[in-house]
Image (cartoon, rainbow, N blue to C red):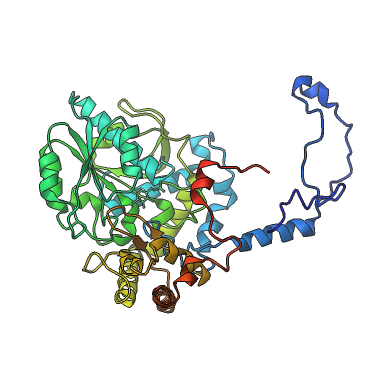
């Protein structure tokens, strides 16, 4: 194992030089009360520039990223993120502005916020927007708080239920519960879609709303969405779309046209910010006319050719984030959309769908496909065939690492046994998809002929199999 940087430290070694001091030395105790002064020097690594550089380059090589290769992590949209996004986001006019600047001094920065919001309204076919939430999950919470405010404002106090399909991402029920609602689960049918009869039996005047992902988490489009919308609106509820799978819909179908009142957009997924290391992300929501009065503040509006900040509104739910959210992620999304333009946004989704279907075809003779139809931008397969030889989805995921690929999402969605959720995205070439399929097929053959190889994987990574339960329960990040 690579040593920690503190273990490489040697007293007196330096990686910097400071200019000669040309002012009197300040007496610290005159500046900071004595009780706050440390009694001994901090234990910081002392190391040369050369060693610092090598240390971090080595660490970066232990990581796997979209810059290394295929990253088919289903539901996460790990697409290649164009470098121009980074370049624009790091321009001083964006990166170094103070969040408390006067409106008239930061018109360009406000314009980016305003126009990014307008683009998202167009993409989703909805009428209102906030860019504040810092992740999809916080967008969910914001949306459900808007639902609550809407019902309350009408004096409709008995609605305490949010309906959610059994295939939903875990953040959906978590958001509904944090917002104070009771979660009632709606079943899926064997084809992966919502069971309309089950939905109808649960739709009543206690329902505040329905949260659904479309295309859903098994990669299938909810073709009955219009009927679903009529059932929910018919009982006085509101429609929430988890927009994590928007990479399948750009320029093709709009949530507003499907009857949704609210959708979050994971900018870091669909609109390309590097993610997967824990952030920062951004989860704007777009809303229908009836939710606009309750949107968070502050908001950017356009008056004539000026952009102004509105700091309070009569019925707002308040703020979900300081200032305007994670601004740098918004700049990246804006850059990405401006670089591509309307026509090419649609091609993102078309190519994502073609790639997923091609990959699915390449492996369908080796892996069980629980849903026998075309997929959208991702598909779910199962390791049930391999399970007969004693090899699980987790084993296959580990073995993929030996072949130099990131694993797909496994054991999600929960409704599929031994699930592997594969999302290649539009940014993989045909050759890369074929290489990835070849690895999956080889692993399936290994499961039949040499399963020890698969069960002992990974063998080429810096660490082998970790006890993931122990790491989660007894987290120790201290040296
Ligand atoms: C990623 C994802 C979320 C949560 O989004 P974050 O930005 O990670 O908070 C919610 N639902 C689905 C289906 C997702 O894939």
Image height of 114 relative to 347, above or below:
above
Tell me what residue is drawn at x 10 percent, y 41 percent. 201
Image height of 102 relative to 347, above or below:
above
Picture quadrant where residue 214 is located: bottom left
Quadrant where the C terminus sits is top right
Task: Residue 312: give x, y in percent of width and height.
Answer: 38, 27
Observer-nearest of 136 and 307: 136
Tell me what residue is drawn at x 32 percent, y 56 percent. 246
Task: Residue 153: give x, y in percent of width and height.
Answer: 22, 25
Image height of 101 relative to 442, above or below:
above
Left or right, 431 with reference to 92 = left
Quadrant where the N terminus sits is bottom right
Observer-nearest of 92 and 148: 148
Image height of 51 relative to 256, above or below:
below
Q: Is residue 267 visible?
A: yes
Tell me what residue is drawn at x 44 percent, y 77 percent. 435
Task: Residue 454: give x, y in percent of width and height.
Answer: 47, 69
Task: Residue 429: give x, y in percent of width and height.
Answer: 42, 75
Q: Is residue 304 visible?
A: no
Observer-nearest of 7 and 257: 7
Picture quadrant where residue 63 is located: bottom right
Tell me what residue is drawn at x 48 percent, y 64 percent. 398
Left or right, 55 with reference to 178 = right
């Amino acid at each position: 194992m690579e040593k920690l940087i503190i273990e490489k430290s040697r007293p007196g070694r330096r990686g910097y030089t400071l200019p000669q001091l040309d002012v009197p030395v300040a007496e610290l105790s005159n500046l900071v009360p004595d009780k706050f002064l440390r009694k001994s020097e901090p234990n910081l690594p002392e190391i040369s520039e050369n060693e610092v550089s090598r240390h971090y380059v080595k660490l970066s090589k232990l990581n796997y990223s979209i810059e290394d290769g295929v990253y088919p992590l289903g539901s996460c949209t790990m697409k290649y993120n164009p470098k121009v996004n980074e370049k624009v986001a790091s321009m001083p006019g964006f990166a170094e502005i103070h969040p408390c600047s006067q409106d008239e001094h930061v018109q360009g920065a406000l314009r980016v916020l305003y126009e990014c919001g307008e683009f998202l309204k167009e993409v989703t076919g909805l009428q209102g927007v906030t860019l504040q939430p810092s992740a999809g999950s916080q967008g969910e919470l914001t949306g459900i708080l808007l639902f609550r405010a809407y019902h309350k404002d009408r004096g409709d106090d008995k609605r305490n239920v949010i309906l959610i399909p059994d295939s939903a991402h875990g953040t959906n029920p978590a958001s509904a519960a944090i917002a104070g609602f009771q979660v009632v689960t709606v079943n899926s049918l064997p084809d992966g879609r919502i069971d309309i009869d089950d939905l109808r039996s649960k739709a009543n005047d206690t329902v505040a709303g329905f949260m659904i992902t479309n295309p859903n988490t098994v990669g299938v489009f909810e073709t009955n969405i219009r009927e679903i919308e009529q059932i929910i609106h018919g009982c006085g509820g509101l429609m929430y779309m988890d927009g994590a799978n928007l990479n399948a819909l750009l320029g093709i179908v709009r949530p507003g046209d499907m009857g949704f009142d609210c959708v979050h957009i994971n900018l870091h997924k669909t609109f390309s910010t590097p993610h997967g290391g824990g952030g920062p992300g951004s989860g704007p929501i777009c809303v229908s006319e009836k939710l606009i009065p309750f949107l968070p503040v502050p908001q950017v509006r356009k008056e004539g050719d000026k952009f102004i900040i509105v700091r309070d509104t009569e019925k707002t739910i308040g703020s979900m984030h300081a200032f305007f959210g994670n601004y740098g992620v918004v700049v990246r999304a804006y850059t990405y959309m401006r670089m591509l333009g309307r026509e090419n946004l649609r091609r993102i989704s078309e190519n994502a769908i073609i790639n997923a279907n091609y990959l699915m075809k390449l492996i369908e003779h080796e892996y069980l496909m629980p849903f026998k139809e075309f997929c959208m931008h991702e598909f779910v397969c199962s390791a049930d065939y391999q399970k007969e030889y004693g090899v699980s989805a987790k084993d296959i995921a580990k073995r993929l690492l030996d072949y130099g690929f990131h694993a797909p999402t496994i054991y999600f969605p929960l409704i599929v046994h031994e699930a592997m959720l594969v999302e290649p995205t539009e940014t993989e070439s045909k050759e890369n998809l074929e290489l990835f399929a070849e690895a999956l097929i080889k692993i399936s053959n290994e499961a039949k002929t040499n399963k020890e190889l698969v069960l002992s994987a990974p063998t080429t990574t810096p660490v082998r199999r970790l006890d993931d339960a122990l790491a989660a329960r007894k987290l120790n990040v201290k040296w």
